[in-house]
Amino acid sequence: MKLRFVDLQAQQARLATDLRRRVDAVLAQCQFVLGPEVVELETALASFCGAKHCVTVSSGTDALQIALMAEEIGPGDAIFLPAFTYTATAEVPLILGATPVFVDVDAHTYQIDPAHLRQRIAEIRAAGRLRPRAVVGVDLFGQPADWPVLRQIAQSEGLFTLDDCAQAYGATLGGRPLGTMADATATSFYPSKPLGAYGDGGALFTESDNRAALYRSLRTHGEGAARYEVLRTGMNGRLDTLQAAVLLAKLSIFTDELAAREKVARSYDQRLGDIVGIPARVPGSTSSWAIYTITLPDAAARDALQGSLRQAGIPTAIYYPRPLHLQPAYRAHHDGVPLPVSEALSERVLALPIHAYMTESDVALVCEAIGA
Ligand SMILES: *Cc1c(COP(=O)(O)O)cnc(C)c1O
């Protein structure tokens, strides 16, 4: 059987009956936007991560955007975020006219470096052109960022905290699920994420009644309590009912899938720890293992390994081949500060297949090919 990078087919086979039943129920009802399944899903997701409010939205990117819109972030505002992340994290502040300020990451956990964050905030304050407003911490590859320290820094600087948890819903830190670590948490249900829909989707979590109400308004064109009353500029950012139905089916096996992913990650650790760099664990955390990333000594070694694995029929991916501050679209918004860890990682990282349906012999196959 073909080894897949992410195996949505195996998951679908397991859930086929439940998926059909739930999708049929939506088709029978014909409430395709914000139907009853959306409400049911919001309750289930909030309860799963222990958050007071869950507001589902149309994508992870829209979740980030709605969270920043609710804080009225715009021109002149500095938003601190890691340079080593997916493009959406930096795109959203720019869409709102704000400026992303790129922060370097830790070489071993790949997460935003709190010491460098402090330094970047001081630099921006000293330069005096931008107003520090928010920290967007990313739980990269499924592992939590250092939220206790990030929160402390944000508190002392008076900054809003947003957890870009697009890759890490289901992960925990200090025994608590992600979803309540920051002022707001945004996640994504893009199909290949640990909890994925059959199309785009996302959600916001918050403990604040006020923020939750704003998110609900902003996802429906800024509407007020009465329909067609427009209180603020919003967007079309709602989740489809069909996606909610799919997610409810998938949520029923999510805990089990997280455990299966953890087993694969541990097996990779054991088999690969002596021959390549394996991801360091964030202390006191569990990962959702959206991505399992190894590091090689340099770009040549990484590219050679990726080539030979491809020949052996083993799919791999590079997250991310270029840090955001060096992207053509973002370079002009960067103040030129070198971010050496992000730059080095982009040349050395390689992501291996990981999903809940990988067998021990699949893992062995990948590791033997890497060893060879
Ligand atoms: C996937 C992802 C997003 C965007 O989510 P979409 O649902 O694809 O819009 C944002 N941030 C990170 C870190 C992601 O991995």
Image (tube, rainbow, N blue to C red):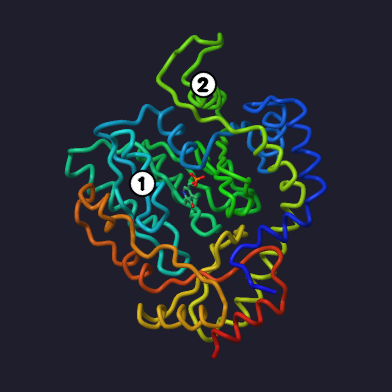
Q: Nearer the viewer, residue 65 or 144?
A: 65
| Amino acid on which the number 2 mark rests in the picture | Ser
- 186 w.r.t. 112: above or below: above
The residue wearing badge 1 is 90
Side of 165 where 87 appears, left or right: left
| Number of on-image labels | 2
Side of 266 where 206 appears, left or right: left
Image quarter (top left, top right, bottom left or bottom right) of the N terminus: bottom right
Q: Residue furthest bottom?
A: 372
Q: Position of residue 224 (x, y in %)?
A: 51, 13
Separation of marks 2 and 1 at Cα, in angstroms: 24 Å
For label 2, count other residues whose C-alpha is less than 10 Å away and answer few (under 14), some (14-19) or many (20+).
many
Image quarter (top left, top right, bottom left or bottom right) of the C terminus: bottom right
The residue wearing badge 2 is 217
Residue drawn at the location 28% of the way across and 34% of the way down? 97
The response on whether ligand 1 sits within 8 Å of label 1 is no
